[in-house]
Image (cartoon, helix red, strand yellow):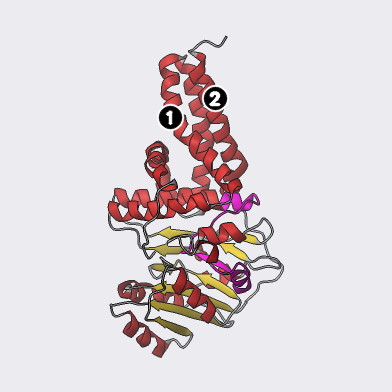
Amino acid sequence: MIKISWLPVALLSLVTLIQLYYYLRYFVLLAFYRKKAHEVNRENAVSIVICARDEADEIARNLPGILVQQYKSSHEVVVVNDNSNDDTKYLLEGLYRDFKQLHIVELVQEAMHIPGKKFPLSMGIKSAKHEILLLTDADCIPSSEHWLKIMQDAFVPDIEIVLGYGAYKKKKGLLNWMVRFDAFHTAIQYFSFALAGKPYMGVGRNLAYKKALFFKQKGFAAHHHIPGGDDDLFVNACATSKNTAVVIDKDAFTLSSPPNSWKEWMSQKRRHNGTGKYYKFKHKWLLGWYMITHVLFYPSLVLGFLMFDWKIILGIFSVRLLVQSIVFYRAMKKLGEKDLFPFFLLWDLWMFFYYIYFMSALWKKPKPHWS
């Protein structure tokens, strides 16, 4: 019969082994990723699609960076003005005078029973002239003038979806630190699983796919009643090990304006986390075990120190910490987030509370926000 003092160390050991499996089977793929050289560099015709509602200030700051992309092949920038009440319309008309590749789609009526931005995004995609669609948001700016060229170059034969990294602009303060850590933690999962042949999501701040795939999937019809999911649920439904590629290149990142308040960020996270319950079962299983073992790790660690030999417990903790630090450091370096590394252990501890707090999003009905 197992003594009660062995139970915490047995639980801690099991949880740690599962966590190490995720780090050494999946996350290490991003940490040690090396881009494969293409035999031929492609320049496909591309339509960049952006939706905006009352974001004149963001458009003024960010859209010029998209319009001046260095790209010799045919391309256009489709901006859908979704019922804006600010100066978006006049700002876009002014930009069109200097940038004829700008294609403006004006929406003056709301779509009934389709919350969020799926309807305007669908209108933008239908208006796009080219087969390859590169999506981003009005509050995003490319990290370089080569973003378009690098993202489209990933469309080698058989590739229909390309996942990019949507980073947040660096600012001072705890909120910015948390927002950027969360974006990194999400990215290490969806990039690593994609590299392992198990793609399950992408972020609309930096995502590309083929127009034919959009129509084959009947757009967002399968989840048009959900406010979010125009990026992750669409990718979850369409992505396979053979049709999905990743772009991990600092010149191909996008930079977004971070939330300005804790309330705004929490609302955004509840909305985004709420789409996870609609993922395919195999992806929910994969992500679920990572979340469960992360939540169990620190309680079992504390119980282990209280009820067992502290030297053995410290040894188990140290093994996980060593693997985690190597993987996180290299992955953060890949994604341009190396300044976050000194605080990763605090973030790891915070994730215990984070998962518990946002767990309710799995069963609560999402609110119909435009996002």
Residue 229 is a magenta residue: no
Amino acid marked by disc 2: Ser
Q: Amino acid at mark 1?
A: Tyr
Q: Quadrant of the C terminus?
A: bottom left
Give the label on residue 42, or none. Answer: none
- Residues 74 and 280: in front is 280
Q: What distance separates the C-alpha of mark 2 from that of mark 1? A: 12 Å
Q: Nearer the viewer, residue 288 or 310?
A: 288
Badge 2 density bin: few <14, some 14–19, many ≥20, Cα 10 Å: some
The magenta region covers: 191-219
Residue in the foreground of this view, choosing between 64 and 103? 103
Residue 105's x, y, as percent? 44, 82
Could you tell whether 311 is left or right of 45 in the image? left
**Secondary element type, mark 2:** helix
Kindly identify which numbered label has been placed on residue 298: 1
| Residue at 60 percent of width and 72 percent of height | 215
Q: Which residue is mark 2?
A: 13
Residue 169 at x, y = what percent? 37, 60
Q: Which mark sits nearer the N-terminus, 2 or 1?
A: 2
Q: Position of residue 172 (x, y in %)?
A: 29, 53
The relative height of residue 94 versus residue 208 in the rendered view (above or below) is: below
Q: Is residue 32 something one can see in this rendering? A: no
Q: Is residue 185 above or below residue 94?
A: above
- Seen from the viewer's position, the closer of residues 125 and 189 is 125
Residue 179: give x, y in percent of width and height: 37, 52
Residue 369: tell me if it is visible: yes
Q: Mark 1 falls on what kind of element?
A: helix
**From the viewer's perspective, is 245 left or right of 65?**
right
